[in-house]
Amino acid sequence: MIPHYGIQLETLTQRYIAAHPRSMKAMRTAGQWMPGGNTRTVLHYDPFPVVIVGGKGSRVTDLDGLEYIDCVGEFSAGLYGHQQGPIHQALEQALKGGLTLGGPNLWESQLAEAVCGRFDSIDKVRFCNSGTEANLFAVITARAYTGRDAIVVFDGAYHGGVMTFAGGGSPMNVPFDYIVLPYNDAAAVRELFAGQGGRIAAALVEPILGAAGNIPGTVDFLQALREQCSLHSSLLIFDEVKTSRCGPAGVQGLHGILPDMTTLGKYLGGGLPLGAFGGKQEIMDRFDPRLAQGLKHAGTFNNNVLSMSAGVAGLTQVYTPRRAQEFHEETEAFKSTLACKLEQAGLPIRLTGHGSMFTFHYGHQEPLSVSDVNETSVALRRLLHLRCMELGIRLAGRGDVYLSLAMTPGDLQELSDGLLQAAGDVLRPPAG
Ligand SMILES: Cc1ncc(COP(=O)(O)O)c(C=O)c1O
């Protein structure tokens, strides 16, 4: 329950339904063929999601013709914005050469070179089709490499729909031998490894706990994981599927804490499906297909020319290390300025995350783990989401904000003004 709130959820919901008749109808039709009209759970929100028909630059348009600044940013995969020049050119060139060629192509080694050149912890890499797959392969690799079973994960973590640890796990999880610890609890990490280190294959961690509210891992916590994994010959896997866009070399680069393996995905394919897992040479070389007892890793579309070529253009022509550093600084400044404005306006909201990916939390404390995220924050984000759409800003249904490279200074100003207004509108009673 939000104290002293302004516009009510019921009012916003009624206005939303009235503003989106075509989306409502299209979602009803979709519901005849797909459960709830949905094929990707995270895209659902009440009363129904708008259908998106196109995107250009920093904006998207819905089926009712309404335009929004796109802060859904495809949950971080939309880093490049819409209709990005070099990426589209690379795709057109790749298309001319034909699809499904059934052999190694020249793009994949270029993309591998770009990835390995970027992340000091990745000597060698393999591609797959999604972040979910990347995490599955990383965990299975760790089990095969160490000959152990247990995987340490963290409360609230999301590593794909089959390894999700919000609210005590999911019946859809693959049945590994998980040990679930609280996030940002270095003491719990040390205690666990002291007692059970010998059976732990790997610790799998998001350096920023994303879906649970963009909660950054503290340096102390991430370092404790690094130390304990080294001490007990377990592998440390950083799930940087989202966070590898934070600066030139992800969160591992920002903190100088290097894992044994890293998983990547989202923006890596330039907007097309792609995942990757990589790490130390001695681990990854087990996949050498010339080895009689080598590990096998298959996937028909692992090196598909569209994802490969778009990924190469994205990493080498657009999101170069220099641009990534600038974007890191610009978006950190944006987040700090917005946080100051919210405070000056007397609104009890904290922003957590990285500059280009952040989440709103109600109150004056920044959460350190998922148990610190209060119900009021969840209610606040629902209100903000609907109010922002009225103001021409599309946040993720659960209230995350993702900034893209396509956003101009004018977009960012409009966004900052809109977010501030929306926060005031939903938290303060209307004047008079
Ligand atoms: C941290 C993290 N890991 C893994 C995944 C799964 O990636 P994908 O949706 O590409 O399977 C996600 C997706 O949101 C994620 O946020």
Image: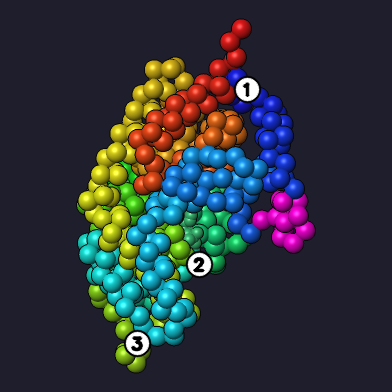
Q: Specify the farthest residue to the top.
A: 432
Mark 1 residue element: loop
Q: Is residue 202 above or below residue 293?
A: above
Dot 2 alpha-carbon crowd within 10 angstroms: few under 14, some 14 to 19, many 20 or more: few
Q: Give the magenta range.
A: 26-38
- Residue 388 relative to residue 196: left or right: right
- Name the residue tied to disc 2: 176
Q: Amino acid at mark 1?
A: Ile
- Residue drawn at x 34%, y 28% is 337
Q: CA distance from mark 1 to mark 3?
A: 61 Å
- Name the residue tied to disc 1: 7
Magenta stretch contains residue 426: no
Q: CA distance from mark 2 to mark 3?
A: 26 Å
Q: For residue 254, say whether it is visible.
A: no
- Residue drawn at x 56%, y 21% is 425
Q: Is residue 7 above or below residue 398?
A: above
Q: Name the one closer to the observer, 205 or 250.
A: 250
Query: Residue 40 occupies which quadrant of the picture?
Result: bottom right
> In the image, residue 174 lies at what x, y percent?
54, 66
Q: CA distance from mark 2 to mark 1?
A: 45 Å
- Residue drawn at x 61%, y 26% is 1
